[in-house]
Amino acid sequence: MVGLGKMGGNMAKRLARAEIQVQGVDPQADALRSEFAKDHIAVHSDLREALKASPVQDRIIWLMLPHGAPTAAVVEQLVEAHQQGLLGEQPLIVDGANAQYQHTQAVAERLRGLGIAMMDCGVSGGIWGLDNGYCLMIGGLAAELMRVQPVLMALAPAPDRGWLHCGPVGMGHYTKMVHNGIEYAMMQAMAEGFAMMQAQPALQASLGDVAELWRHGSVVRSWLLDLTASALHDPQAMQSVAPVVADSGEGRWALQEAVSKGVPVPTLAMALMSRFDSQGQADTANRILSLMRRGFGGHAVQTTAPMKSGSAD
C-alpha cells in the first residue's frame, strides 16, 4: 500500500485484519511505524525496500496517493524497479487515486507495453471505511480481477457486496467521477434546505433537531444526512468553519464529460458553480453587477476596503 494517509492507512489496516500481508510505503514512515505495528504492517519510507520485503508472487501494488504528480512520480519509480527485476514476472498496479479516467487509460496502455498490468479503483467510504468497509469501483481486465478479488472482498463492507467490476481500465475512475458528481448535487440540495430552515424566524426547533427528525423514516434519510445531523448537534459547528467549499476536481471532470456527451446535468452544474462562488470566484461578477445598478438606476453600493494588488479578482 503506497500512501498511508486517511484512506490508504485505514485500507492497509483493514486488509491486515483480514489476514492479508501488507507492506506500507509512506514518506512519513518513521512517524507511522508505531501506529501500524499492532496490525503487523511494516512501514517503509523507500518503495524499493518495501518491494524487497514482500513476496514476489501474487504481489499487488496499490497506490493511494493524490492524483497527478504524486501518483505519476511513484509510477515512474515502479517502471524503473520493473526494469531492474524487482516487480516479478506479473506485476499488477492498482491506482486508487480519483484520477481523470482518460489519463488513467493512457497510463495503463503505456504500462502494459512495458509488461506491467494496471487496474483503476474508485474508492468511497472516507474515514469510516476501516470499520464499515469501502465502496470499490474497479476497472481492468477480467484476468487481473481474479488476482485482486480477495483484496476487494476484504476491503468491501461484505465479500458479496460493496465492490463491482465496472469494465475495462478507466471505468473504475469514471464511475467514481460520476459518483462524486452526484455527491456534489446531494450535498448542495441538503445545504440549501437547511439554509431555508435557518432563515425562518418562527422555527423553534434547532437545525440539529430537524436533521435528526429527518433521519428516521423520511425519504431524504441518508448517510450524508446522518453526518449533517451529527455536525449540527453542536451549536457552534457552523461558526467554526468559513463559508468556503473546496472542489477536488471530480465535479469538474464530471461536468466536462457530460458536456462532451451532450448529457444534461443542470443540478451537478449548479452545485459545482456554487462551490466556485464560495471560493470567491464570483466576486468580480458581483462587483460589476453593483456598478451596473449604480450606473442605470443610481442605486447605492456597499463599499469595501480597496482590493489588494494581484488578488484573484
Image: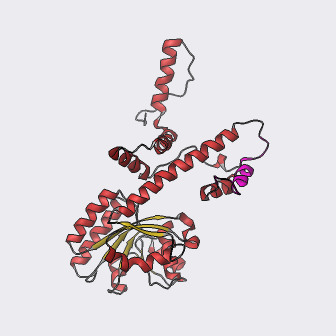
Give percent across and percent down for residue 52.
33, 84
Q: Residue at x 75, y 35 (%)?
A: 201
Give percent across and percent down for residue 212.
72, 54
Residue 204 painted magenta: yes
Question: Left or right: 74 with respect to 160?
Answer: left
Residue 272 in sight: yes
Residue closer to the observer: 180 or 145 = 145
Question: Left or right: 7 with respect to 139?
Answer: right
Residue 142 painted magenta: no
Q: Quadrant of the C terminus?
A: top left
Residue situated furthest right in the rendering: 204
Residue 32 in sight: no
Q: Residue at x 33, y 74 (%)?
A: 142
* Above or below, 77 relative to 271: below
Q: Residue at x 39, y 64 (%)?
A: 172
**Colour convention of the picture:** secondary structure
Question: Left or right: 265 with respect to 204?
Answer: left
Give the quadrant of residue 120: bottom left
Q: Quadrant of the N terminus?
A: bottom left
* Above or below, 286 relative to 243: above
* Above or below, 292 relative to 250: above
The span shown in magenta is: 203-220
Residue closer to the observer: 17 or 52 = 17
Give percent across and percent down for residue 234.
71, 53
